[in-house]
Amino acid sequence: MDTVTIKDIARALNLSTSTVSRALRGSYEINPETKRLVLEYAERLNYRPNPIALSLKGSSSRAIGVIVPQIANYYFSQAINGIEAIAYNRGYHVIIFQTHESYEREVANVQQALARKVDGLLISLSSETSDVEHLRELQERNLPIVQFDRVSNELNTTKVVADNFAGAFAATEHLIKSGRKRIAHLTIPPWISITQERLAGYRAALEQYGLEYDENLVRYGTFGPDEADKLVDELLAQSPRPDAFFTASDRLALGALAALQRRNIAIPQEVSLIGFTNLNVADLLSPSLSTVVQPAQEIGQMAAERLIELIERKQKAAPPSTIVVPSHLAVRESTRVSE
Amino acid sequence: MDTVTIKDIARALNLSTSTVSRALRGSYEINPETKRLVLEYAERLNYRPNPIALSLKGSSSRAIGVIVPQIANYYFSQAINGIEAIAYNRGYHVIIFQTHESYEREVANVQQALARKVDGLLISLSSETSDVEHLRELQERNLPIVQFDRVSNELNTTKVVADNFAGAFAATEHLIKSGRKRIAHLTIPPWISITQERLAGYRAALEQYGLEYDENLVRYGTFGPDEADKLVDELLAQSPRPDAFFTASDRLALGALAALQRRNIAIPQEVSLIGFTNLNVADLLSPSLSTVVQPAQEIGQMAAERLIELIERKQKAAPPSTIVVPSHLAVRESTRVSE
DNA sequence: TTTATTTGCGCAATCGTTGTCGGGAACGTT
DNA sequence: AACGTTCCCGACAACGATTGCGCAAATAAA
């Protein structure tokens, strides 16, 4: 009584549903005149095919699942923004799932996405995830998957990531060139892909400039609140004290900034601070925060584009590859030494 | 071959699909023994009912649609976070739509949500929306709707909003009490509900403290980028010059802050600045920004709770009401005058 | 005129699940 | 012995759309 179905059209035009269906999708074996009639009537009634019926029929659901640790995070919300923009243009819907950094919820979310018959999955792994069997299974069932940001190399899928190595290298190099010698690295859990890459970039820069890598200067946070305080304390307790902090996430950067200010440590006079973040307010902070800028939205866009290509081309799509989106250095007050 | 259906179970146990279906939902007219058999087998095969088939069948899709202007906005991403948390607990999925502040896309999104057979809709109107016929129609079709944040009073639905009047009143009062006399109000488009309420709070405070309301001090922005600059210029050009700015959104607050700094106007010495925002970095800005804090996540949660109640109780749910979530004042440096 | 071929369309199955109906077996009641 | 009840369960249709198959009429070829 409510929404128009193919049956309504068939009844009204005294045709069979098959004919209407074929007319609507322009099958060659329908009389042009009949076709016109159907099309006009459908237009007039504002007919829209029922996507639920279509998914049930087995074709596609025109929905993609997006699994991220947390929506209320500037990085991910921007990435989702990019994803949604592409998906919308291509006629797909986006169903969002949050893992809240929990492996269990990630597995549950993957199941749910599957049950919803999403045509493909975009995922950024939770910090707890080390085992990726739940994804491998999907892959074997031929569900298109694209990983982004936090990816696992155990999984042979297309991946879209920022250039973490180069970004970390550039940040570290910048600190070294501005005269810093004991550069601490405050980062996220070690088993996450981006942690490794950033750490590698950090080490490579140290090495290139003849500074020793001291693992006591590296601290791994989780994603809990206010843990930066503790980590900063531990690092400051060392002697000689670090003269620079390189942090690997928004939260840690802000946490470190707040922690240092609370301890009345002058930035950048006493210690420099640079973040690997995505904050749009970095230059309004006090002091304005130097950052390695990640193109979150672009990453989301590219991931969505790749996924849709995978969905629509299936077998004949390009083989899994890793797309590295460049990041760039934004130098601001927090690392500006005037000596 | 892939996912387990009720048919597989029926075949394996030599039963009919009807019986299996009934056994699974514990119908009383199934032999307990049979029931046990079915349940066990289903458990073993990890059977999950196909939600697509269920939605087609006409019952519920266990999905709710969320329509917001923009995900990459701290307010909305937090609200969505709250929504998702509640939805997840109650077994619902969240399908996200962005309007990008476009009326046309809002209408399209509403249609899409409908086509997806969402069980209910949470919506925060786009800034372009003045006509709400597209929603009234849904309402007449008995689709549960809850409006939040940017709501229309043309529509008799449950609404969840921050206490915009009280928040604006408190902000204005605070500025007045700290000695400000010409308080400018930088706000969002006038036809949005929250604009009206905040404006009313602003006016009420002026009136209560015997200050004249000057409409030249009120400027309406859109949601475009970098427009704050222009508005700030216009306001500063007046004489006497405003000695305080009260802004109504994150973007305007940050824009005003940046604009004032670029003009080398000292905050709070020359002008005070207070925002009606949801920024988590407000106290790390330079100067730290006084704000009226909106409980975005809580608003999302309450909206989701109300919606699900509406969905599950249908007719016998509570009648539409407006839930006002209190906001509070956070005074920081940007309004701290030491005279 | 008879036989092929094309054109245009309908029938029925299908996807996974549920609701309506009805029917056989076992039991209890006269 | 005949009838009425329960108790369990299966057949069938339906939700909205697609699709393989087949069939009739019209046209072309023989």
Image: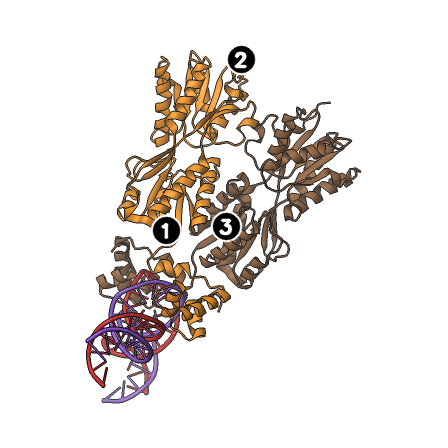
Chain colours: A orange, B brown, C red, D purple
**Label 2 CA crowd tier, 10 Å (few <14, some 14–19, many 20+):** few
Q: Residue at x 64, y 39 (%)?
A: B248
What is the CA distance from the residue labelled 1 to the residue labelled 3?
18 Å
Percent position (x, y) of residue D9? 27, 69
Q: Is residue B37 above or below residue A273?
A: below
- Tell which of A296 and B287 is nearer to you: A296
Drawn side of residue B276 relative to residue A330, left or right: right
In the picture, the disc for residue A267 is none
Circle 2: residue type: Ser
**Label 3 CA crowd tier, 10 Å (few <14, some 14–19, many 20+):** many
In the picture, the disc for residue A338 is 2
Callout 1 secondary element: loop
In the picture, the disc for residue B66 is 3
Camera-near label (1 vs 2) is 2
Percent position (x, y) of residue B179? 75, 29
In the figure, residue A264 lies in which quadrant?
top right
Res. A273 in view: yes
Q: Is residue D26 above or below residue A64?
A: below
The residue under label 1 is: A118
Callout 3 secondary element: strand
Res. B318 in view: no
Drawn side of residue D17 relative to residue B163, left or right: left
In the figure, residue A76 lies in which quadrant?
top left
Chain where mark 1 sits: A
Percent position (x, y) of residue B67? 52, 50
Circle 3: residue type: Val
**Label 1 CA crowd tier, 10 Å (few <14, some 14–19, many 20+):** many
Drawn side of residue B246 relative to residue A45, left or right: right
Chain where mark 3 sits: B
Give the mark, 1 or 2, whose residue is nearer the N terminus. 1
